[in-house]
Image: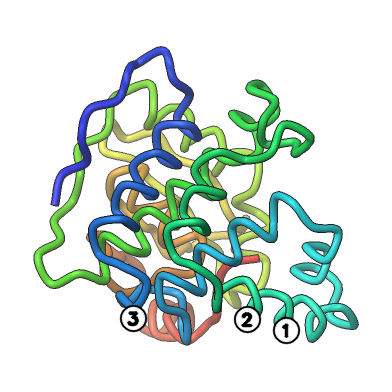
Amino acid sequence: MPSPPYPDRMSLASRERAALCDLFDEVGPDAPTLCEGWDTRDLAAHLHLRETSPLAVGILLPPLSGVMERRQREMASGDWSTLVNRVRTPPRWSYSSIGPIDARLNASEYFVHHEDVRRAQPDWEPRELSEADERALWGVLQAMAKRFYAKSPVPVVLRRPDGAELIAKPGHPAVILSGAVSELVMHAFGRTDHIILEVEGPSDMVEAFEQTPLGI
């Protein structure tokens, strides 16, 4: 299920947003995703709420999570085409309508959620991203890897195909995750299935690592 081409002048965030919304149109509101308990309707509602409502702080503040979940269910129950169009084109007052801010804050968000829908479909296969997009996603890992892997009980190193490494949790010996940057990003965001990575290290450390919940 390859993505249609979008102009290179668009940011990674903009291209992934457009591709995800096209995929929403294709698979409909009841398709599965890799987000546990969510179908595409739930995911679209989450994305719209995240960009347009102060309730989105419920993502990080547990006391508000219940209110956010109720509002998300309300959004999800509305007209599907309208909801997709709202995700596709954020309102002008949203931070996501400001190009540089959208490019910085939403690249990984829309990449991961696009893959959440793609990889939940039976015919999915890995995409080959451009070097520029891989660099952008590597930048996300450089900024956030220590936070993503903070709960790991063992040291973790991320290794991309050219051999460059990033220490996600210091220490030696370490569990080493090797693969395309896009696959490393999916793993860091907690998508430990439906990915293509090699995991190396002492067997007891690998076992402990694989039992640890990941993501923010």
Residue pictured at 25% horizontal, 64% vertical? 27
Give coordinates of residue 28: x percent, y percent. Answer: 30, 67
Residue position for label 3: 203
Q: In this view, does 186 lie above or below 10?
A: below
Question: Sequence-wise, which precedes: disc 1 or disc 3?
Answer: 1
Q: Are marks 1 and 3 in contact (CB under 8 Å)?
A: no
Q: Tag 1: residue type? A: Arg
Residue pictured at 86% horizontal, 72% vertical? 61
Residue position for label 1: 70
Residue that sits furthest to the top in the current view: 9
Residue that sits furthest to the left in the current view: 123
Residue pictured at 29% horizontal, 53% vertical? 23
Q: Tag 3: residue type? A: Ser
Q: Are marks 1 and 2 in contact (CB under 8 Å)?
A: yes
Q: Residues within 10 Å of mark 1 (few under 14, many from 20)?
A: few
Q: Tag 2: residue type? A: Arg
Question: Sequence-wise, which precedes: disc 2 or disc 3?
Answer: 2
Give coordinates of residue 117: x percent, y percent. Answer: 33, 63
Q: Do the residues labelled 2 and 3 touch (CB within 8 Å)?
A: no
Q: Residues within 10 Å of mark 2 (few under 14, many from 20)?
A: some
- For the residues labelled 2 and 3, the Cα–Cα distance comes to 42 Å
Q: In which quarter of the image is the C terminus?
A: bottom right
| Residue 35 sits in quarter | bottom left
Give coordinates of residue 141: x percent, y percent. Answer: 54, 44
Q: Is residue 97 above or below residue 17?
A: above
Residue position for label 2: 73
- For the residues labelled 1 and 2, the Cα–Cα distance comes to 5 Å
115 or 140, nearer to the observer? 115
Badge number at residue 49: none
Local SS, label 1: helix
Q: Would you say 74 lies left or right of 119 here? A: right
